[in-house]
Amino acid sequence: MKRSPVVLALALALAAPAFAQSPDPAKLAAVKDRMQKFVDDGELAGAVTVFGNADGVFQHEAVGFANLEAKTPMAKDSIFRIASMTKPITALAVMILADEGKLSVDDPVEKHLPEFKGQMLVAAKDKDTVTLKKPARPITLKDLLTHTSGLPGGYPSVFADVYTKRNRTLAETTLVISQQPLQFEPGSKWAYCNAGIDTLGRVVEVVSGEAFDAFLKKRVFDPLQMTDTAFHPSPEQLRRLATCYGPGPDGKLTPSSNLIVDFGKERKHPVPAGGLFSTGADVAKLYRCLLGKGQLGEVRIISEKGLAEMTKVHTGDLQAGFGNGMGFGLGFAVVKKPVDATEMLTPGTFGHGGAFGTQSWADPNQGLFFVLLIQRTGLKNGDQSAMRHEFQKLAVEAAKR
């Protein structure tokens, strides 16, 4: 039966999220004020926050300092190490190739990387002996995307210098990873796995015939005009790099000396699991695109179907993610039951955090995205940080009618 225009308009209005096109200025100010308090209390050196919807940005603010010692103010275009926020972007590259029929997420990894053939599983381990056996099945691309492959979570000790050596290729990194035995049967557990995401980056290279960073630039960053997002920042971008801080012996913030934090002048291979640098404006463009079901303006990055597959829970009842009520999609963490830092969000919210406290999330049901950029080590759990909780809570309040 055909509905009248009035009935149709009413149905659409009821289905729309109850958020204003122009948030209340006083409530917007509360977001900035709360972030400033974290700075004033010595919890953060500075922060950049952005939130909005698929159509645009409600607020983009910078507070505090990019460098405390030099008293360099944090700027809206300050550059941040977004670390593991790189992971869903790597997954996006995989799904772009899936859209084109060049691979399937159900493919065994060995189909694209033969070095993974014959991979074994740890059956037993004691002080002097490791017993290996054949796993029930080979690992798949989906296992890598969902962190359920059984690969060791970090990098093999022989390759622990992956961040500091400039002469390692992604192919060499993946070759070493392929020789590590699995720690559990594929699909049986969730265990966060950097090595698995790096392997996906190599798959993208092999299937596309392009260097991983070049593929992302051509297929994601350039189309979305993410001009400040790269694995190897330019000298000009490095001048805008926010310093990373952690608590010193006296509890006060001090610059963090960490191999991952430090950035040499020479180039190194792109790290698909966590090597990107970016800005608030750039990350916002990506998440507006995701809220737009894979499209921003006239630019489509991924099919609506492909994005829907990425952002639904694939881990079932497995305990996944870095907080209660979480599951995992293909590269994205997904909220199953809002609680704690996600209590103001809705089921189906997806996104990812980074090692230095950065966060980026999209809530399709409320039609909102949230980007929090900080450079802070020593947080017990960045996904559950007070900074993330307070920012999201006040941003949702500001967006309400």
Image (cartoon, helix red, strand yellow):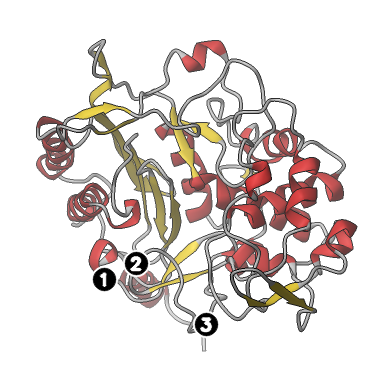
Numbered label attached to residue 131: none
Can you name the residue that lies furthest to the bottom here? 1
Choose between 85 and 76: the one closer to the eye.
85
Which residue is disc 3 drawn over? 316
Tag 2–tag 1 contact (CB < 8 Å): yes
Percent coordinates x, y for residue 176 in the rendering: 76, 49
**Residue depicted at x 55% and y 45%:** 86
Q: Which of the two marks, 2 or 3, is nearer to us in this view? A: 2
Percent coordinates x, y for residue 10 in the rendering: 33, 73
Identify which amino acid the numbered label 2 is placed on. Answer: Gly
Q: In the structure shown, which secondary structural element does the residue marked by tag 2 occupy? A: loop
Choose between 319 and 62: the one closer to the eye.
319
Tag 3–tag 1 contact (CB < 8 Å): no
Which residue is disc 2 drawn over? 323
Per the model, the C-alpha gap separating discs 2 and 3 is: 15 Å
Identify which amino acid the numbered label 3 is placed on. Answer: Gly
Q: In the structure shown, which secondary structural element does the residue marked by tag 1 occupy? A: loop
Of pointers 3 and 1, the one earlier in the residue sequence: 3
Q: In the structure shown, which secondary structural element does the residue marked by tag 3 occupy? A: loop
Q: Badge 3, how many Cα within 10 Å: few under 14, some, many 20+?
A: few
Percent coordinates x, y for residue 220 in the rendering: 64, 40
Identify which amino acid the numbered label 1 is placed on. Answer: Val
Percent coordinates x, y for residue 39 in the rendering: 16, 32
Per the model, the C-alpha gap separating discs 2 and 1 is: 9 Å
Choose between 267 and 80: the one closer to the eye.
267
The answer to whether one can see residue 377 in this image is: yes
Which residue is disc 1 drawn over? 339
**Residue depicted at x 39% and y 63%:** 322
